[in-house]
Image (cartoon, rainbow, N blue to C red):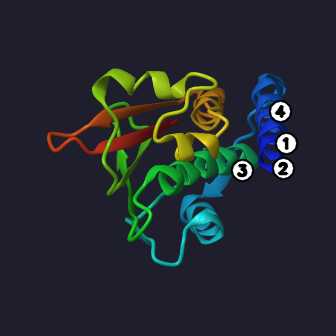
Amino acid sequence: IQSSVRHAYNLLSDLNTFVGLSQQQVVGTSIKVPSVITEIWQRYAPLTAKLEMGPMPAISGTPFLFHMMMEQLIKNAVQHGPENNLVLQIESMESEDGSTLLRLQDNGTGISESQLEQIFLPYRRLGTQHEASRSTGMGLSIARKIARLHEGCIWAENDAEGKTSFYVKVT
């Protein structure tokens, strides 16, 4: 019963966050991306996990919202990545239009092509029944909504080896 109550609470909390994002205003404050990523990683990653982060630029946006977006992406990697020896690689590159593109890839099994867009829909949960029971299915929806508030976007792609990368484009 306790886990059901906790899940219902988390679902309502995530739904409240998702709906409340429509009323948020983006403020152009400089955000130190490595600091945000490191703080989130230290909070959620197991001790056996490894973070590999390349050089990251400062970006402009609302720090609270950017933190929330990255938190959803990193928590997703931790939750759905391998239980032992998770490795999360995060790198930054410049996109063709001059905006910043962040790529996150873990050493998990990847996501099937048919589900790459569905994972961003509200209440969509993938994985085993145990993994799905720990999730509300709102995290990636929240992350995408925050990216759009920053006039950016989030998507997922598979490479030739079937590994899934998440891309975050911020202007």
Q: Earlier in the sequence, mark 1 or mark 3?
A: 1
Q: Which residue is mark 3?
A: 63
Q: Tell whether 73 sits left or right of 164.
A: right
Q: CA distance from mark 4 to mark 2?
A: 15 Å
Mark 3 vs mark 2: give the one in front: 2
- Is residue 124 or residue 24 the one in the foreground? 124
Query: Is the residue under label 2 in contact with that under label 1 (CB below 8 Å)?
Result: yes
Q: Which residue is mark 2?
A: 2
Mark 3 vs mark 4: give the one in front: 4
Query: Is the residue under label 3 in contact with that under label 1 (CB below 8 Å)?
Result: no
In the rendered view, tell whether residue 135 sits above or below residue 75: above
Mark 4: which secondary structure?
helix
Q: Earlier in the sequence, mark 1 or mark 4?
A: 1
* Quarter placement of the N terminus: top right
Percent across and percent down for residue 12 are 83, 32
- Label 3: few (<14), some (14–19) or many (≥20) C-alpha neighbours in 10 Å: some
Indicate the amino acid at tag 2. Answer: Gln
Indicate the amino acid at tag 3. Answer: Pro
Name the residue located 67 percent from the left edge and 51 percent from the top edge.
67
Percent across and percent down for residue 87 are 37, 65
Query: Is the residue under label 4 in contact with that under label 1 (CB below 8 Å)?
Result: no
Q: Quadrant of residue 19?
A: top right
- Is residue 103 or residue 98 the one in the foreground? 103
Percent across and percent down for residue 94 are 35, 44
Q: Which residue is mark 1?
A: 5
Mark 1 vs mark 3: give the one in front: 1
Name the residue located 54 percent from the left edge and 71 percent from the top edge.
46
Q: Quadrant of residue 38?
A: bottom right
Mark 3: which secondary structure?
helix
